[in-house]
Image (cartoon, rainbow, N blue to C red):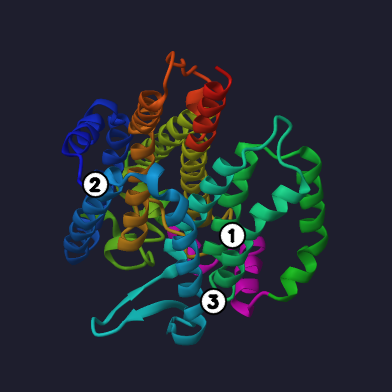
């Protein structure tokens, strides 16, 4: 099949016109502040961070230009199944670090990957595809449809929790059900789920590992060493913070994992309450923007699901991490999104934003092109495509046009 270069040219010209520049501008301040903190903590980690940013930028650009609306029908289920296989492989060939088997070694490279990070993209894309194919009725999904979509969430949740990585598993679980809440589920379904979760809580607690039970006990009782040092760091920063040389909690290594899970505590020590409040506001504005996009494109379930899923993912990560360091949540290995030092998590978010920007930028492109081709093939009077028709899947629009032709 010959490549239509004019169509390819039009495709690439569409992006700058419809690119959501505000999303990128909202992320940049987080990256700049994070880079500054990581460089002060460890210059070697800063060099790694810059490498992650370059790789993330490349992944973002690739995700922006991939025609997701064209390939999602096969990419979403294939990606989901492939990542499930990776999660299952962790139990067989996974590498154990600090008592947890969460990583898969890449043969011949000395590097490892964490499949539990990649599955987040797959789950949200799978939900987006399924919801797009079978949108909820006006009153929301019932028990049967809810159960079908729950399978997509619960299978990876159980595989991740088994590693054990309960923190990441719960983030995935809450994000998945947050998406379903946003899309629409009948209230009696949610009431049943809450009752079931409440009744099963004691049984689930008995199946936790000893270190997980200890974290819950520390949360309910005396704060752990990690939390104590984080509180000291935040308290010593005061309102305006202190110079790098005087940030002794971090510089003298009292604050553990200061570049990753507890980087927010170093932010408080270094820039004080004002610095912490600034970052919180940046996150809130980003989440509001994503939820606004989900509302604006409420009839396009691909955009609604991806934007809503990304908003919930950032919201849950942010709250768990911040509450964790001040002793209001158990200590789990959950980083601050696009702020903590780390490559895999940042690249995943870069891909997420690339997919969302692509879906928004090319929303009309495929619809107009599909409708134009169908109309050119019709004989007789041209049939007008209404605004409501543009929100329908392509297969349904084509069937309606064929029915109109037969009725002439």
Q: CA distance from mark 1 to mark 3?
A: 13 Å
The answer to whether 146 appears left or right of 90 in the picture is: right
Q: Which residues are magenta?
A: 208-231
Give the image location of residue 144, x and y in percent. 75, 50
The answer to whether 174 appears left or right of 306 in the picture is: right
Q: CA distance from mark 1 to mark 2?
A: 30 Å
Near mark 3 (Cα within 10 A), the count class, few <14, some 14-19 or many ≥20, is many
Name which quarter of the figure residue 82 lies in.
bottom left
Give the image location of residue 90, x and y in percent. 47, 79
Q: Main secondary structure of the magenta part?
A: helix
Q: Is residue 230 magenta?
A: yes
Give the image location of residue 50, x and y in percent. 18, 56
**Reading the chain from its start, which is encountered first: label 3 or label 2?**
2
The residue that label 3 is drawn on is: 163
Q: Residue at x 52, y 23 (%)?
A: 405
The residue that label 1 is drawn on is: 170
Q: In the rendered view, would you say 389 is above or below 45?
A: above
Can you see residue 8? yes
Task: Give whichever of 183, 68 is nearer the camera.
Answer: 68
Q: Secondary structure at mark 2?
A: helix
Q: Residue at x 55, y 17 (%)?
A: 408
């Amino acid at each position: 099949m010959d490549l239509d270069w004019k169509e390819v040219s039009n495709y690439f010209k569409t992006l700058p016109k419809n690119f959501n520049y505000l999303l990128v501008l909202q992320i940049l301040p987080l990256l700049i502040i994070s880079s500054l903190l990581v460089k002060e903590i460890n210059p070697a980690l800063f060099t790694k961070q810059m490498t992650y940013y370059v790789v993330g930028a490349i992944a973002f650009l690739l995700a922006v230009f991939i025609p997701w609306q064209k390939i999602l029908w096969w990419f979403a289920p294939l990606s989901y199944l492939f990542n499930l296989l990776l999660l299952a492989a962790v139990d067989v060939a996974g590498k154990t670090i600090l008592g947890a088997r969460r990583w898969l070694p890449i043969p011949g490279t000395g590097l490892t990957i964490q499949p539990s990070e990649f599955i987040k993209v797959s789950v949200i894309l799978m939900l987006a595809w399924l919801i797009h194919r079978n949108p909820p009725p006006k009153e929301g999904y019932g028990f049967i449809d809810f159960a079908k979509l729950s399978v997509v969430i619960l299978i990876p949740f159980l595989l991740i929790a088994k590693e054990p990585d309960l923190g990441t598993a719960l983030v995935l679980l809450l994000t998945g059900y947050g998406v379903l809440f946003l899309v629409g589920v009948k209230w009696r379904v949610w009431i049943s789920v809450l009752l079931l979760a409440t009744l099963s809580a004691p049984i689930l607690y008995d199946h936790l590992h000893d270190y997980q039970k200890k974290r819950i006990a520390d949360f309910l009782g005396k704060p752990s060493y990690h939390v104590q040092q984080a509180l000291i760091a935040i308290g010593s920063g005061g309102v305006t913070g202190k110079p790098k040389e005087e940030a002794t909690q971090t510089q003298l290594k009292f604050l553990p994992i200061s570049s990753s899970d507890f980087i927010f505590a170093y932010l408080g020590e270094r820039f004080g309450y004002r610095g912490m409040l600034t970052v919180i506001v940046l996150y809130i504005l980003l989440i509001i923007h994503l939820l606004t996009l989900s509302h604006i494109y409420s009839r396009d379930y691909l955009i609604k699901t991806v934007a809503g899923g990304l908003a919930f993912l950032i919201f849950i990560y942010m709250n768990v991490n911040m509450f964790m360091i001040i002793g209001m949540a158990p200590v789990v290995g959950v980083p601050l999104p696009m702020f903590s030092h780390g490559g895999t998590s940042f690249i995943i978010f870069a891909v997420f934003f690339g997919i969302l920007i692509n879906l928004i930028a090319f929303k009309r492109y495929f619809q107009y092109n599909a409708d134009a081709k169908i109309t050119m093939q019709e004989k007789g009077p041209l049939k007008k495509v209404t605004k409501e028709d543009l929100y329908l899947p392509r297969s349904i629009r084509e069937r309606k046009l064929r029915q109109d032709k037969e009725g002439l």
